[in-house]
Image (cartoon, rainbow, N blue to C red):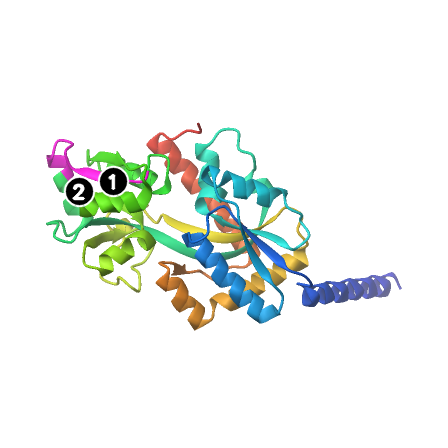
Amino acid sequence: MKKTLASLIGLTLLGVSHSTLAAWPEKPVKFILAQAPGSGPDNVARLLADQLTRITGQAFIVDNKPGGQGLIGAQAAARSAADGYNYFLGTVAVLVTNPLLIKNMPYDPAKDFEPIAYVSSSPFAMFVQQDSPFKSVQEVVAHAKQSGGSFSIGHEGPRTFGGMIARLLNKRADAGANLVAFSSGPVGGLTNLVGGHVNSFITGIATGSELTKQGRLKVLAVTSPQPLADWPNVPTLSSSYPGFDLEGWQAMVAPAGTPPAAKQRLNELIRQVLAEPEVQSKLRAMGQQLAPDMSTEQLGAFLLQEQLKWAEIAKEVGVTPE
C-alpha cells in the first residue's frame, strides 16, 4: 500500500513539474549583460533574444550593465531575483578569470550562478601585417629569440585574456619577445599593427577578421582546438605549442536558486535556437564559433574545468589578484 501511495505521489510531482516546464515563460525574460550595446556579447545576446521571442511568443529583453571589468553587470545578475526570469550571459572573463585578477570580488561565480547553456566561443589568434615575412608562429618565435627583445607582440593588457595568452606563449616558447600592451584596446592595437608600430598582435578573431578580409592583416594561428571553418588553412596554436586550446566563450547562467524547471526549459530552447542554420550563419558572421551541445550538467563540468585550467595559467605567468 505504501509503495502504491509513493508511486502516486511521484506521478503527481512529475505532472506538476511537466506542467511548470510547459508554462514557462509566462512573462518577459531578462538577459543581463556586463558589456555595452554593440559589443560582441551584446550582438550574441540580442540574436538569442530575438529568436527566443519568436519561438515562445514572450519577450526576451537584453539589459546592458557595462563597466568595472564586468563586475557591475555580474553583480547585478547575481543579486537579481532567482525566479526563472533573470539570467546572465557571462563570458570567460566574468565567470572564470576575474577572481584570478581582482581582489575583493563583489560576486562569486561558483556560488552565485548556476549553469544553463553554452552559447558560443570566440578563439583568439596571432595577427601580423599582410606583407610580413612570417608565415607561422614558429617563425615568429625563432625571429624573436634572435632579435634580442626588439621583436614585439602586442596585446590588450597584461591582465586581459589576450595578454595572458601572449605572456604564456612568450614563456613556454622562451621567445624573449617584447610584450606591448595597448590601453586603447584591441582596435587600437590592431591599428598600430597595421601602421607597423608593433610586429604582431594577439586578440580575438572577431576583432581582427575584418582587417584580414580587407587584406591588411594575415592570421598565423588560432587558439581553437580545431582549425576554423572560415580559415581552414590556418593552423591551431596548440599544434605547435600544446596546451593553447584557450578560447573566449559565452555561456548563459542563472542566479543561484532559480527553479530547475525554468533552467531546463531555457537550456532546451537555447539549444534549439543554436541548431538552426540561419542562427549558425549569423553567429559565424559575428566571429563566433558554434557551441558544443551541452546539458546544464555538462556546462557545469565545463565551467569547473575552465576554472582549474585558468588558475594554473595565472600561476604560471605570475598573475595574482590586485
Q: Residues within 10 Å of mark 2 (few under 14, many from 20)?
A: many
Residue 84 placement, left or right of 186: right
Inter-mark Cα distance, 1 to 2: 8 Å
Kindly identify which residue carries mark 2. 199
Q: In this rendering, would 7 be left or right of 144?
A: right
Q: Which residues are magenta?
A: 144-156
Quadrant in the picture for the N terminus = bottom right
Task: Mark 1 or mark 2: name the one nearer the start of the chain.
Answer: 1
Count of numbered tags: 2
Asked if labels 2 and 1 touch by Cβ distance under 8 angstroms, the answer is yes
Residue at far front of view: 37
Give the position of the C terminus as an image quadrant. Answer: top left
Residue at label 1? 154
The kind of residue on which mark 2 rests is Asn
Q: Amino acid at mark 1?
A: Gly
Of the numbered discs in the image, which one, if any, rests on residue 283?
Answer: none
Q: Position of residue 35 (x, y in %)?
A: 46, 47
14 horizontally vs 1: left or right: left
Q: In the rendered image, which quarter is residue 160 located in?
A: top left
Residue 202 visible: yes
Residue 90 horizontal/vertical position (percent): 50, 49
Q: Residue at x 85, y 66 (%)?
A: 4
Residue 230: % across, % down: 29, 64
Asked if the magenta segment contains residue 41, the reply would be: no
Looking at the rendered structure, the secondary structure element under dot 1 is strand
